[in-house]
Image (cartoon, helix red, strand yellow):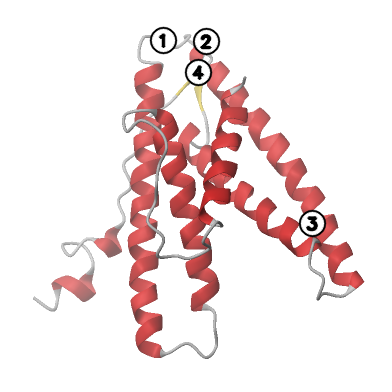
Amino acid sequence: MSFTTHCNEIFNQAIRDYHITDNVDTPISNPYDRDSIENRLYLKCWIDTVQWHFEDLIRDPHINPEEGMSLKHRIDRSNQDRTDLVEQIDSYFRQLYSDVTPLPDATINTESPAWAVDRLSILALKIYHMKEQTERTDASPEHIEKCKSKLNILLEQQKDLSLAIDQLLDDIEHGRKYMKVYRQMKMYNDPATNPILYNKK
């Protein structure tokens, strides 16, 4: 089984588990060992799934302003958690391939493996929710057909991205490419670098 096949299975599991209650306040019940990559992948997609629904909720034009602000703070925390997890997944890959000596002509990729895996998780969510749209009984035939067309494109994207990630990992494993882990330097979360925060001290 390829790495991305395994990823997609775990992502689908996390999405299904979330939708048992379909509630953003449902506590996670991660079935995988804490130190495993599977645990990180499940957690990653769970966070993405909860945030997907945060983003739906905050677009309610009638949302109470205080509830909206509270939700915005939850989205900010979720984004930070998501970024932290991407770095953890990249650290896993860095450790996994730590004994590989890059070839003299090895090149670096435009994005790290974990950021590509991040996109794969989001694609799994798009596919789940677009499929939901194709199964609606309260929507017009035109809407259903439009969503079916979009679903086919998303499935093609998933296939292509999965292949690209597996090829990238194979290239890293055989020294044709090398990777670096760049820590995210989000300045707006840091009270030392966000002028709105440090000027209020």
Do tag 4 and tag 2 residues touch (Cβ < 8 Å)? yes
**Image coordinates for residue 151, horizontal then vertical, percent:** 78, 53
| SS of the residue under disc 2 | loop
| Nearer to me, 23 or 4 | 23
Drawn side of residue 149 relative to residue 158, left or right: right
Which quadrant of the structure image shows residue 198? bottom left
Drawn side of residue 164 relative to residue 176, left or right: right
Q: Nearer the viewer, mark 3 or mark 1?
A: 3
Name the kind of residue labelled 3 in the image: Lys
| Nearer to me, 86 or 14 | 14
Drawn side of residue 153 relative to residue 14, left or right: right
In three-dimensional space, the C-alpha distance between marks 3 and 4, rounded to whole angstroms, equals: 33 Å
Drawn side of residue 71 relative to residue 160, left or right: left
- Looking at marks 4 and 1 on the same chain, the residue that comes earlier in the sequence is marked by 1
Do tag 4 and tag 1 residues touch (Cβ < 8 Å)? yes
Do tag 1 and tag 2 residues touch (Cβ < 8 Å)? yes
Residue pointed to by mark 4: 172
Q: Residue furthest right?
A: 141
- Looking at marks 1 and 2 on the same chain, the residue that comes earlier in the sequence is marked by 1
Residue pointed to by mark 1: 100
In three-dimensional space, the C-alpha distance between marks 3 and 2, rounded to whole angstroms, equals: 36 Å
In three-dimensional space, the C-alpha distance between marks 4 and 1, rounded to whole angstroms, equals: 8 Å
For the point 55% across and 45% down, which residue is it?
121
Residue pointed to by mark 2: 174
**Image coordinates for residue 109, horizontal then vertical, percent:** 52, 30
The quadrant the N terminus occupies is top right
Q: Nearer the viewer, mark 3 or mark 2?
A: 3
Residue pointed to by mark 3: 150
